Amino acid sequence: MNLKIAFTALIGIFLAIIIFYGIMNWYPSNFDQIYLWSEYIKNETNKPKIFLFGSSHTGNLDTNYIQEYLKNNKIEHEVYNLAISSDYPTRRAETIGYISELKPEIIFYGIEIRMFEGQPDMTKEQLTALEITQIEGITPNPSEIFEDLLFPLYNNDFFSKIPKSPKIITLKTIKHFIHNSNETTTLDFKSNEPFYNIEKGVSPVVDLEVLQKDWNKKDRKFYGIDPQKNREFNTLKEIIKELENKDIKVVIFATPKSSVYLNWLETEDKLIFEQMLKELEKPGTAVYSEYNQYADDNIWTSVDHVVQSDLGIIYSQDTAKMIIKEIKK
C-alpha cells in the first residue's frame, strides 16, 4: 500500500512538472510581447544596441529624435525604447532573461520616486488572509532560507529565462483560453518603441498654475518610502546585478518632475529617494539624479509627464547627450 501511495505521488509530481514546463514555455513563446519582440529583433541588426527601460515617463522620450541625434554625432548604435506603462522593477524582472540574451551594450533605466512608494495604512479588518500571512514575524522566513539554499542551482542562463512569477503566467494562460484573447495585436515589431506608441502632440502643454489647481483638487496622498524593506528597490538592485554579471552596463536616470509634483512631496521622502540613488551608484553603474532640471519650465502635460512635442524635445536631447557620454566612457 505504501509503495502504491509513493508511486502515485511521484506520478503526480511528474505530471505537475510537465504542466509547469509546458505553460512556462507556451505562454511566452506565443503571447508575451517582450519575448516575441526579442525573438524578432535578434537577427535584425548587427549594430550595438542601447535599450531604454522605464514607465510612461521614459516612454515620452522621442526615440526617433535620439536615434537621429546619435547618428549626427557619428554614433551608429540602435536605440530601442522598451518603456511600458506602469512599469516597476518587479514587473521588469519577469522578462529580464529575454532582454539580456539580446546583449545590449548599455541599458538606461528611468526610475521615479513612486516606483518605491509604500502602501496606505490598513486596519487588521481591512487585511486579506494573504496579506496577514505576509506580515513579518519574529521567526525566520522559510521562503528566504529555501531561496538561499537553491540560489547556486537557479542562478544561470536557463533559469533566468523562466518568468519570475509562474502564478501570473498561469493565470494569463487560463485567461487566454477563457476569453480567447490575443495580447499581441498592438505590438509593432518594426518600431524602435514597440510597447509604448503614442502620437506626438496628443496631450497639450498645461500651464503650471492650472496643473497646481487640478492637483490640489485631486488631494493625492504619498505614502512614503521605506528604503530598508522595499521590494521594488531590492528587485532593482538584483536586476542591475544580473545584467552586470552578463557584462551589460546599466545606467540609472531619475525621470523629470514638475515643480507642482516636487512641492507636493515631503522633503524627507525626496531625501530618501536621493539616498537610494546614491546607493545605486558604484563603479560600473552611473546614476543621473537631476529630476528637477525642468521643474519650472512650461513643458508639462501633467505634473510628471513632459509633453511629446517640440516644446518637450529638451528632455530627449539631454537624454541623447547622456547616452553619448556613457558610450564614450
Image (spheres, grey):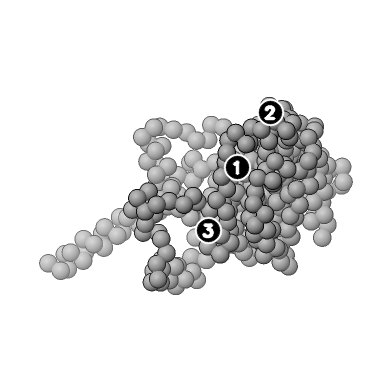
Residue 223 is situated, as x and y percent measured from the top left of the image, at: 55, 51
At label 3, the amino acid type is: Arg
Q: Label 2: few (<14), some or many (≥20) within 10 Å? A: some
Identify the mark nearer the N-term, 2 or 1: 1
At label 2, the amino acid type is: Ser
At label 1, the amino acid type is: Ile
Q: Quadrant of the N terminus?
A: bottom left
Q: Is residue 239 left or right of residue 137?
A: right
- The residue closer to the viewer here, 48 or 326, is 326
What residue is pinned by disc 2? 203
Q: Is residue 256 visible?
A: yes
Identify the mark nearer the N-term, 3 or 2: 2
What residue is pinned by disc 1? 84
Q: Secondary structure at mark 3?
A: helix
Q: Secondary structure at mark 1?
A: loop
Residue 50 is situated, as x and y percent measured from the top left of the image, at: 72, 50
* Residue at x-position 31% and y-position 59%: 14
